[in-house]
Amino acid sequence: MIASYQKKVLVVDDDKDIRELMHLILEMEGYAVTELDNGHGVLEAIQALRPDVVLLDVMLGDMDGRDICKHLKNDPGMQDIPIIIVSASHGLHTMHEKQCGANDYLAKPFDVNELVNHVRHFAA
């Protein structure tokens, strides 16, 4: 019997409600979801988990998600991991403002189907 590989998603958002909503939706779609509520543990979590997709909020309480994104995209060991920037207050233009190299952008509030489609696209 062949074991199926469950795709892994890392959700980084300081808003507990948003994080839990994303977790619930993606888990129902069959993804293994890990949550972080701040930016400090992102690098270690990515190295340990090797997620298939990272959903990264811009306005974390302790850090700017675009700075984290830029760091990840400049790291040869992590640059191929798709990052979807999630933000209520910043549009696509601000994602490029810091040239963070994110793969995609998802606006808050997000449509459930839109969230699933973005993750499915990059986790494929």
Image (cartoon, helix red, strand yellow):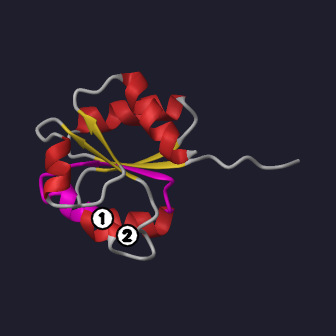
CA distance separating discs 1 and 2: 6 Å
Whole-percent x and y of residue 63? 14, 60
Does 38 lie within the magenta span? no
Q: Nearer the viewer, residue 108 or 95?
A: 95
Question: Which residue is pictured at 20% across the width and 46% down the height?
Answer: 14
Q: What residue would you read off at disc 1?
A: 41
Question: Which residue is pictured at 19% across the width and 54% down the height?
Answer: 96
Q: Nearer the viewer, residue 86 or 28?
A: 86
Q: Is residue 59 visible?
A: no
Q: How many marks?
A: 2
Q: Nearer the viewer, residue 124 or 11?
A: 124
Whole-percent x and y of residue 47? 45, 70
Magenta part of the protein: which range?
50-69
Are the residues flagged by discs 1 and 2 in contact, CB closer than 8 Å?
A: yes
> Is 120 on the left or on the right of 59, as rendered?
right
Which residue ends up furthest to the bottom in the rendered image?
Answer: 76
- Quadrant where the C terminus is found in the figure: top right
> Is 52 on the left or on the right of 84, as rendered?
right
Query: Above or below — where is 31 with respect to 65?
Result: above
> Is 87 on the left or on the right of 75, as rendered?
left
Secondary structure under badge 2?
helix
Query: Above or below — where is 116 with respect to 86?
Result: above
Query: Above or below — where is 74 with respect to 115?
Result: below
Whole-percent x and y of residue 44? 37, 70
Q: What residue would you read off at disc 2?
A: 44
Does 57 lie within the magenta span? yes
Amino acid at the residue labelled 2: Glu
Question: Which residue is pictured at 25% across the width and 50% down the height?
Answer: 37
Q: Is residue 81 visible?
A: yes
Amino acid at the residue labelled 1: Gly
